[in-house]
Image (cartoon, helix red, strand yellow):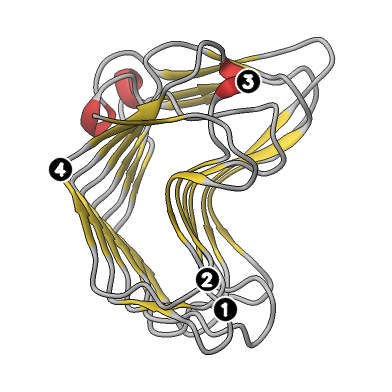
Amino acid sequence: IIKGTKSGDKGVISFSNANSNNNNTISNNDITNAGTSAADRPLYGINSAGASGKVNSGNVVSNNNFYDLLNTTLTNPSIVNIVDFNTNWTISGNSFYETAAVNSLSNTIVSFIKVGAFTAGNGSSNISVTGNYIGGSAAQCGGTALTKNADATFNNELRAIIVGENPGGAISTNTIQNISWANNSATNVTMIYCHTLSKNFTIGNNTIGGSDSKKINYT
């Protein structure tokens, strides 16, 4: 088990931009929080933001369980955050879930996987997101629904997967289901969100929703 707590813009695992971080594999781990409250959870599970001339390349994140990591007190939390100056990453076979209900503690956008560059020309490409599971209270969208409760004051927009500039990349064969997401007023829920910079990548063969026991319920 790998555990982490809130530390600025760091993740439980972070790839810095001091030098290029290449050809690493993070596989077959349970990755979760080490905090005593929801507010202590980290901003990211895995975070990689390179820099010009220091691109992080050839890394693999596979077959991990990411659970109990959502922190709705922070600005735009994401469990796997592979953004500017990253190329040739593979994110596959991972499960993202919450073992207990999450509450809205601020107005923020929540995502599980965020990939690609979000500033034009910041060098991200060929990031593959395949065969991952988002939802439920156990691996592979199992157990009861991943639940986010409504709050009288705060709302959380859900963007399950966010894609920025990622030419040559793919978002395919992922399963997003078994989710119950509630807010007190109309707030967007998007399973695959394409940023205005996203282009020249593939989306295909993803499973979104399912039978009554695996449905996505939004209120």
Disc nearest the viewer among 2 and 4: 2
Which numbered circle lies on residue 28?
A: 4
**Mark nearer the N terminus (3 vs 1):** 3
Which numbered circle lies on residue 51?
A: 1
SS for callout 4: loop
Tag 3–tag 4 contact (CB < 8 Å): no
Vertical position of residue 185 compared to residue 85: above or below: above
Mark 2 crowd level (few <14, some 14–19, many ≥20, 10 Å Cα): some
**Mark nearer the N terminus (2 vs 4):** 2
Amino acid type indicated by mark 1: Ala
Amino acid type indicated by mark 2: Asn
Q: Which residue is mark 3?
A: 39
Amino acid type indicated by mark 4: Asn
**Mark nearer the N terminus (1 vs 4):** 4
Q: Which residue is mark 2?
A: 17
Q: Is residue 154 left or right of residue 45?
A: right
Q: CA distance from mark 1 to mark 2?
A: 5 Å
| Whole-percent x, y for residue 31 in the image | 31, 34
Tag 1–tag 2 contact (CB < 8 Å): yes
The residue sitting at 49% across, 64% down in the picture is 16
Q: CA distance from mark 1 to mark 4?
A: 28 Å
